[in-house]
Image (tube, rainbow, N blue to C red):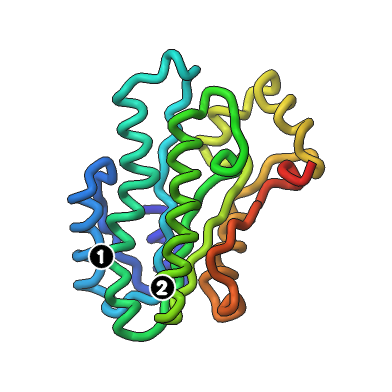
Amino acid sequence: MDTAKLVESKHRTAHILPADLTSAEAARDLGKRALEIFDPIDILVNCAGVALVAPFEDLTQDMWDRTLAVNLTAPFALTQEIVPSMIKQGRGKIVNIASQTGVIGADDHAAYAASKGGLISLTRVLAGELGKHNIQINSVCPTVILTPMGEKVWGPPEKGDPMKAKIPLGRFGQPVEVADLVLYLASSASDFMTGGTVMLDGGYTAM
């Protein structure tokens, strides 16, 4: 709602289409509803996600299933609904919000890391298949970003400080920094970039 109000404050139109992304069918329905409003669709950003973390031996089947459903199956289903519209017009931009944890391991993140690693691999395959249609698709892999969810998990110093110590820039990311990178990948400035795994991690994976 806050995002819609911000868009409308700029004298633009915003549409809110809620969906339960634990369901592939609901994700496909979301794509169909979006195409009823905007057809063709130029840009798709798959950014919804959940982080249900626990030590591997305590990870329940429900936690695993929900994580994979939202973080991997929903982007697959939604993208499959939207891509024909992009192919028809001969261009498109897809940005998948993956994670640093999809590239390197992290304790207690078995389901999350598996889902984000799968999303990165899906991105690479689609870059090859969709390039002939002038569709570029890339993954953004942030470290900890101080969204409300990030603040809840990493805000306490005893949890956050050891993690910050591993980041050369010495801090966590801000939501606007992710948004700026997505804007670049959604713009014509990135037309020769596809299949990329773009790290947004303050140098964490460089060390």
Q: In the rendered image, is residue 11 in sight?
A: no
- On the question of residue 173 being in view, the answer is yes
Report the amino acid beneath label 1.
Glu
Side (left or right) of 187 relative to 15 = right
Of 167 and 138, the residue lying toward us: 138
Q: Which residue is mark 1?
A: 81
Find residue 130 and name its label.
2
Residue at the image point whose x is 29% and y is 63% from the top:
80
Q: Residue at (40%, 81%) from the top-left corner?
A: 133
The answer to which of marks 2 and 1 sits earlier in the sequence is 1
Which residue is drawn at the image coordinates 35% and 26% (left, top)? 63
Q: Mark 2 to mark 1: distance in Å?
A: 14 Å
- Residue 118 position, x and y percent, is 44, 46
**100 relative to 107, above or below:** below
Direction bottom: furthest residue: 89
Asked whether the residues under the numbered discs 2 and 1 touch, taking CB atoms below 8 Å apart as contact, a structural biologist would say no
x and y, in percent, of residue 205 in the image: 72, 43
Q: Position of residue 187 (x, y in %)?
A: 54, 76
Helix, strand or loop at label 2? It is helix
* Amino acid type, residue under disc 2 in the picture: Leu
Query: How packed is label 1: few (under 14 Cα within 10 Å), some, or many (20 or more)?
Result: some
Please identify the quadrant where the C terminus is shown. top right
Secondary structure found at label 1: helix
Relative vertical location of residue 23 with respect to residue 150 in this rendering, above or below: below
